[in-house]
Image: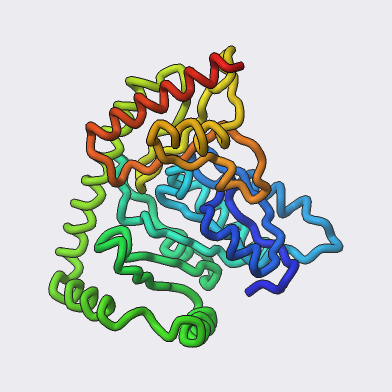
Amino acid sequence: MVNPGESVLVESPVYAGVIPMFSALHCDLVEVDTDAKGISSESLRRVLENWPASKPKPKVLYTVPYGCNPTGMTAALERRREVLSLAREHDFIILEDDPYYYLYYGDAPRVPSYFNLELEQPEVGRVLRFDSLSKILSSGIRIGFLCGPEPLLQAIDMHTAVASLQTPSLTQTISYALLNAWGYDAFKQHTEAVSQFYRGKRDVFEAAMKKYLGGLAEWSTPEAGMFFWFKLRLGADGEEGDSASIIREKAVEKGVLALPGTAFLPNGQKTAYVRASFSLLSPEDVDEAIKRLREVVLDAQKAQ
């Protein structure tokens, strides 16, 4: 879909796993702002309307609309509709990477996907949707599935046949047998149970954040996925600083593993943000981890 040197629109911050992929394709990553409501359609419009006339406009926008990795944010309905409208107006494809769609645990009804919302448009074919079984069946099963324009699906199928031959037959057979036995209703019931499991994990993590990092960090509560994205106040006067060395060195020395926000910024700029996953730890370990992180932040403030 893109040629070397062409531009690709990405959320900022963006899932770190796609940065080297786009870099290998020699793409120019153009960052679009995000906030607590997900991708900023206003920022996207500003980027596109001020695009240099001498430079081809981007053909694709990469976005993670539910429980985004790393921010944990979910794109609001009005934002999604505006992005779809911009896709038609400026002629690009939305790469809807949505592995956390079924891990929604917010109180409000789940908003439709881009793929589903496009049915409201006069024409369809501008959304290529990626789903995953890894987050709802087994992390090691490594099976995803696609919905989108048939020419793109055919090209992806041909590329996959050359690149990896196919997903292993064993995991495909296991998944098929399970989904076939379940049917849709049992599958839906299973995913609802999984999402509530993660909601409980989120609540435990946020309780520890409030207990130990109140006044030392700020965050928005995620409603999907498995990540917290929070800004540390590392300066002695409570101002933000750079989280990279603090998280990669001081926190690790205390046995706390997280990722500094710079890992999710295409330009690698400094940031006070941190991404932490709450999917694995027990409540006791969460409490201890955030307690140790508090010590790291307090030590950093004293060192200023």
Q: Is residue 60 left or right of residue 68?
A: right
Can you say whether 234 is above or below 147 in the image?
Answer: above
Can you say whether 77 is above or below 4 in the image?
Answer: above
Q: Quadrant of the C terminus?
A: top right
Q: Nearer the viewer, residue 50 or 289?
A: 289
Q: Where is residue 195 in the image (x, y as percent from the top left)?
A: 25, 49
Q: Residue furthest right?
A: 54
Q: Quadrant of residue 131?
A: bottom left
Q: In which quarter of the image is the N terminus?
A: bottom right
Can you say whether 140 is above or below 277 in the image?
Answer: below
Residue at the location (53% across, 21% down)?
300
| Residue 150 seen in this snapshot | no
Count all numbered tags in the image, as a single digit: 0
Q: Where is residue 219 in the image (x, y as percent from the top left)?
A: 45, 30
Q: In which quarter of the image is residue 147?
A: bottom left
Q: Position of residue 244 (x, y in %)?
A: 57, 36
Residue at the location (46% across, 37% down)?
229
Residue at the location (33% across, 41% down)?
278
Q: Nearer the viewer, residue 30 or 115?
A: 30
Can you say whether 20 is above or below 199 in the image?
Answer: below
Q: In this view, does 258 lie to the left or right of 264?
A: left
| Residue 138 seen in this snapshot | yes
Q: Where is residue 48 in the image (x, y as percent from the top left)?
A: 71, 54
Q: Residue furthest front?
A: 253
Q: Which colour scheme is used?
A: rainbow
